Amino acid sequence: MLSILRSLVQEVNSARDLQEALDIIVSRVQKAMGTEVCSVYLLDPATNRYILMATEGLYPDAVGQVTLAYSEGLVGLVGSREEPINLEDAPSHPRYRYFPETGEERFRSFLGVPIIHHRRVLGVLVVQQRENTRTFDEGEEAFLVTVSAQLAGVIAHSEATGVISGLSLTGEEARDVSFNGVPGAPGVAIGQSVVVYPSADLDAVPEKAPEDVEQEVVLFQSAVKAVRDDIERVAERLASQLRPEELALFDVYLRMLGDDALPGEVTNKIREGIWAQGALKQVVQQYVRHFEMMDDHYLQERAVDIRDLGRRLLSHLQERGQEQLEYPERTVLVSEELTPAMLGEVPKGQLVGLVSVKGSSNSHVAILARAMGVPTVMGLVDIPVNQLDGKELVVDGFEGQIFASPSDDLRAFYQAICEEEDELIRGLEALRDQPCETIDHHRVSLLVNTGLMTDVVRSLSHGAEGIGLYRTEVPFMIKDRFPSEQEQREYYREQLEAFAPNPVTMRTLDIGGDKSLTYFPIQEENPFLGWRGIRVTLDHPEIFLVQVRAMLKASEGLNNLQIMLPMISNVSEVEESLHLIYRVYHEVREEGYDIHMPKVGVMVEVPAAVYQIRELAERVDFLSVGSNDLTQYLLAVDRNNPRVAQLYHSYHPAVLQALVRIAQDAHVVGKPVGICGELAGDPGGALLLMAMGYDSLSMNAASLPKVKSVIRSVSREWAMQLLEDVLLLDSPHVIKSCVDLALRNAGFGRYLRPGKSNSAAYAERAAS
């Protein structure tokens, strides 16, 4: 069964579209199970009805015609119960629904299993049998459940591909197609997508029609000639070093490039209306699929040769086609994995949004996007990137959501959000030089998180009182080697000078987890629980010492430097770090630099640190909570993984209780405590943190004006009562709703983040 399943998944994965994928499923499952009928019903989200999409055994004319309401018939029962239903005599079941157009009255045994992907019921997979004495056994039921679970993601992707192309399951025009990912940078953007793909990656090639068919044919023939010349040249050079049987591989490549072989098929595809790169992709994938399904191991290995040949041809095609890439006035850049270089290719002023299948909110691209103020969504698992080129997209960077083919209503709705955001920011500019103080005179420092000089410019214009978190890994990430002491010193001096005399808190190098350096790769099975943060730099004191030395020298004459240690989980790490910092301090003083010993603090990011606050605070000058990491470690949820993103919640009761405890314990020993993370930049979260006693809140510059406005308009007593109320609640969603309601009642409804709540409001408005 395992080999059958593997072969089935492989075939379905390479299907051209949803219908072909479903036809393969019903055909192969019927054959594998030796049953008379196999059918797939998919749930159409537009109508909330099941549609018979493919069948092997029922009348073919019923496909696309037979539909059932969400809870109608046995199919609806399987979907609503979300579990298999196995019946020996289906017609006798009270939920049985007979459709004469299917001819299913001949079949009595019924086994249906739900097709579920990310908690969403996509449809139902059904097998039926004529014999009324046969009940599908447990093994067959388990096999069908396995098939359903294995293929759910493929079906979801194929379904999304069809919808992106403009058609729903019923064949009607699809609008407002949404995909969920991870927020990369806040904001809303509306623009035209441009798909950028890495060089020589066949899987990433987008599908589109050629502007000039004959020109595409000439381009492809030129690529074939170039690859033939390359292979002949290599074969000639290696002729004296290889045995005849090894040289024969080059002959195989050259035969594949004959006019009657691969090039002929690609040319035919181009003439059918597919651009050269897309035609090459389709033909190569077809060849690869054919070879991989063969039983002979030697022939299976030839799939590798085909794929290699395809990459060589694609590389030549891309060299000649690079100049064809054009960027519209409002460009939304889309890629399997965005890189900083891709951002730099877009003409200034034309980049309005970013969409990346891979990546996280902490990736270099996300940091750049936040610095540039470009709304970004990342981690879009099921999105068919290749189908998006040239499509109009709405990018909601607040909630990590994109919409393709937006309707006039949705476009107008998000356009209004863009305008409201711009108007709100302009209205808050007057607060820039005002202190962040409640109406009952409780003072809170508002700081910013930075990584680049562009962050600093925006931060100063928004009235930041200092830097609560400078991510020193950014200068390391934009290099192809470790930056020298002098290079680091220049980066740090820029930040320190820009904010002097206000404090600038620099976190020592924090790599590992999802922050990697190309020249210092860390390969681990579980990187978030592995070698990261202070663990790396204490194991490599040469990196730590150079960085601290650069920081100290950069602070000369300014003396506004604060150093913060990341990923601390025990006291010994603090003591070892302090020993190295004091050592560097004395060495730099001996070199003649007139500097003051900077304040040193600890980042509270892991649960272990929560229970050692007093011990840690006794050894350092201040504490700062990294709320993003602390939340993910407390909840055991990778915040960058869209599969579990719904479980990550900053308002979780456990998170709030931990934050309360940290603030209380820090103040018991008389040490200031701040917080940097998404919660601090949320107006409601900022109120709760202020009520808990946090002395400073550090956030992205864009969030600062809203947070300041809210804090300046309430009393701390009011905020403390709100905190007292929500600490009695046990659901993060109820807590968030309670905080939002309090903000609305206080007149701050306009400050609540656009996103899912607004999407819901749009849907509600559209329905009415």
Image: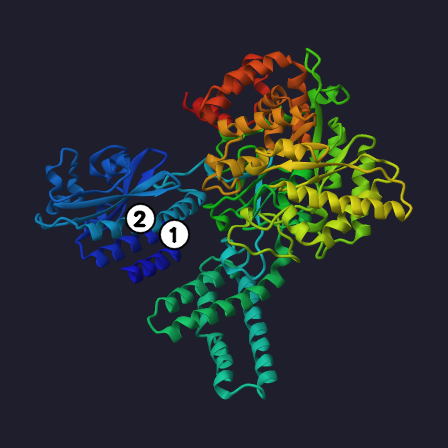
User: Mark 2 sits on what residue?
Assistant: 148
Q: Residue at x 76, y 48 (%)?
A: 547
- Secondary structure state at the residue bearing disc 2: helix
Q: Which mark is residue 752?
A: none
In the picture, measured across the screen, residue 293 lies left or right of residue 69, that is right
Front residue of this view, candidates 304 and 619: 619
- Badge 2 amino acid: Ser
In front: label 1 or label 2 = 2
Q: Residue at x 51, y 67 (%)?
A: 310
Identify whether 151 is placed above or below 675: below
Q: Which mark is residue 17?
A: 1
For the residues marked 1 and 2, what is the alpha-carbon distance in whole angstroms?
18 Å
- Badge 1 amino acid: Asp
Front residue of this view, candidates 283 and 85: 85
Q: Residue at x 43, y 63 (%)?
A: 285
Front residue of this view, candidates 466 and 674: 674
Q: Quadrant of the N terminus?
A: bottom left
